[in-house]
Image (cartoon, rainbow, N blue to C red):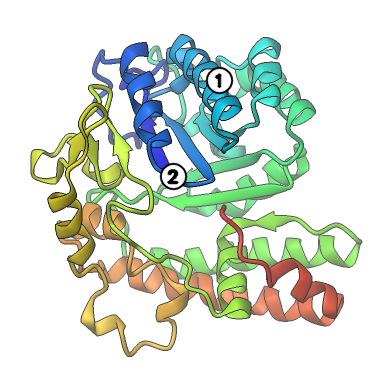
Amino acid sequence: MNLTLHLTKTCNLACAYCYQKHEQETMSIQTARAAADMVFSYPHKAHGFSLYGGEPLLAREVIEDLVTYAAQKTERTGRTVRYKMTTNGTLLDEEFLCFAGKHQIAIALSHDGAAQDISRRFPNGRGTAKTLEPKIDMLLKHQPNAVALATVTPHTLPDMADSVLWLYKRGFIRVNTALDARPDAGWAEDDLATLGAQYRAIGDYLIARAQNGQLLDYLNFTAKIRAHVTGKGCITCELGLTQPSADTDGKLYPCNQFVGQTAFQMGDVWQGVDMEKLKDFCTRKVSPSICESCALAGRCRHACACLNFQQTGRLDRVSPAQCEMERIVIAEADRVGKALYELMGDAFLDRFGQVTAG
């Protein structure tokens, strides 16, 4: 079982595009342990936890206790457990990074590259870029394959390629960008041409680096290329099964976007999953009928119930803007994929023909 733990709703930043309320709520150690008990009650050979916030390192004591508690369970059961954590990086230190290395906690850093100080600021308005410089060095020393996650808004869109390139030049080899998905983010039709140009600039850089012998991973393209090579969809949404979430109070929800919404609660970490609720979620339609005949259906995110609900208020409705954005990124991924195949030959299939867990 893979479970997202919403460890805290507090954060030490005030990012311009954050959609969370930053309430003073943090998961207790007892609740986190109950979540681990529930996860290990399932007979799977491997389990996973995504450590989420707010800023999860504000709940560092809970993280360290949970991981230590789960380690005891792995010793007794012979099962394995993996961890993923997304952090703003400001609270990283050597001690925690050593702990993360010992227990295989894969850390992703939220960083907007060249645009970092535009949106990602401390509550007093001070930018965070300078604070993160030594943190980046520490992270990449311990986890050279760490992912950098950049959020792009309409305001920072003209800087998207520069920001991605900044992150690569800073030492990251795996970068992902997420377009601000808030319904009121302010995307306009004119932004589509700019988005295409930004993706093309990123693609040109990736091809040039590959020609010079270094393959960089831009996850936005990689997912599309791999879906084409393997024939496996980018997203197969099994609402409630793929990645359920536990709120700070231990209540369970089918995915991140539904946390705190009573209508979507499906049990808690003490009593377990409400199977009737889960059955209901699993049978709900999340793929819009209009998408089923689209040639790109297997390579886009039209079946992501979380994204659909966030943007349109319905599980099975894709926003027109999202549809066009997916078409743009798929087209550029195909251009990059073609260039890499011509350059790499059979090694291309070795790299992109493997279905990974993320």
Q: Where is 320 relative to 61, above or below?
A: below
Q: Amino acid at mark 2?
A: Pro
The residue wearing badge 2 is: 43
Residue beneath the point at 40% across and 63% down:
191
Q: Can you give x and y, in whole percent of width and height, for residue 182 in the image?
A: 28, 48
Residue occupying image coordinates x 75% and y 37% = 170
Instruction: Choose between 351 and 90: the one closer to the eye.
Output: 351
Give the quadrant of residue 208: bottom right
User: In the rendering, at what x and y percent does residue 306 appear?
Assistant: 28, 54
Give whichever of discs 1 and 2 has the lower sequence position.
2
* Residue placed furthest toward the right: 212
For the residue pair 89 and 25, the one nearer the viewer reads as 25
Q: Residues within 10 Å of mark 1 (few under 14, many from 20)?
A: few
Q: Residues within 10 Å of mark 2 (few under 14, many from 20)?
A: few
Q: Quadrant of residue 311?
A: bottom left
Horizontal relation, residue 206 to residue 304: left or right: right
Tell me the amino acid under the disc marked 1.
Answer: Gln
| Pointer 1 residue | 72
Q: Is residue 304 left or right of residue 267?
A: right
| Callout 1–callout 2 Cβ contact below 8 Å | no
- Is residue 175 in view? yes
The secondary element bearing badge 2 is classed as loop
Q: Position of residue 167 (x, y in %)?
A: 68, 42
Q: Residue at x 55, y 42 (%)?
A: 149
